Amino acid sequence: MNVPERSHPAPGPSLTEPDPKCHFCRNMAEPARVRDRLVWESASFHVHHHVEEDGSSYLGALLIQTKRHAPGLAELSDAEAQELGRLIHRTSRALKSCTTAAWTYVHGFTEAYRHVHVFVAARYPNTPKAYVRLAVAEWPGAPKGDHHDVIELARRLRESMLAMEDGEATSR
């Protein structure tokens, strides 16, 4: 097997300091931009509903991102990796509970933006095959809404996730 030699990345910003060139770090520096769409927040992660700036938005597209600058999954601490797994699970459950989603998609590439972020998206019943996976939000018949609809769904998702958290706390 021909495995390329490991190259060492060029020194960059600290993994704890925001990178001023990073789209996601800039979002964390201006939390008011997404506050009305906030679904969940912890010391390490921020979850909000994605919104299209120039029109209607796909209802059920959540973005989980690290608060600190971490360029890839390998740079997460064990505790952060465990929390990310729990957040993916909880956001998926909340989406199924608060929408008519048949299941959820999860994807994150951290290639264009070198900052850990994961999309969790509702996959609605009867989505035509031409619009499955990464094209799900392009389906003309998909549930979409204006900014008010996104804010309302984010509120319901937040309540659902808080109920999950409360349920876990009482079962311990």
Image (cartoon, rainbow, N blue to C red):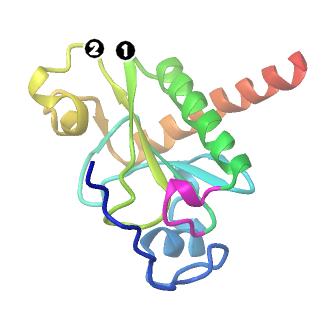
Residue 139's disc number: none
Image height check: is 69 above or below 38?
Answer: below
Question: Callout 1, which amino acid?
Answer: Ala
Q: Is residue 144 visible?
A: yes
Which is more N-terminal, label 2 or label 1?
1
Query: Is 113 colored magenta in this rendering?
Result: no
Residue visible at 75% across and 56% down? 43
Secondary structure of the residue carrying numbered label 2: loop
Residue 77 x %, y %: 69, 55
Packing grade of label 1 (10 A; few <14, some 14-19, many >=20) is few
Using the image as rendered, state which of residue 19 and residue 37 is in the foreground. 19
Q: What stretch is highlighted in magenta?
A: 69-76
- The residue indicated by pointer 2 is 125
Gap between marks 1 and 2, in whole Å?
5 Å
Residue visible at 37% across and 15% down? 102
Question: Callout 2, which amino acid?
Answer: Pro
Image height check: is 60 above or below 1?
Answer: above
Q: Based on the displayed image, in which of its 4 quarters is residue 131 positioned?
A: top left
- The residue indicated by pointer 1 is 102
Magenta-colored segment: predominant secondary structure = loop
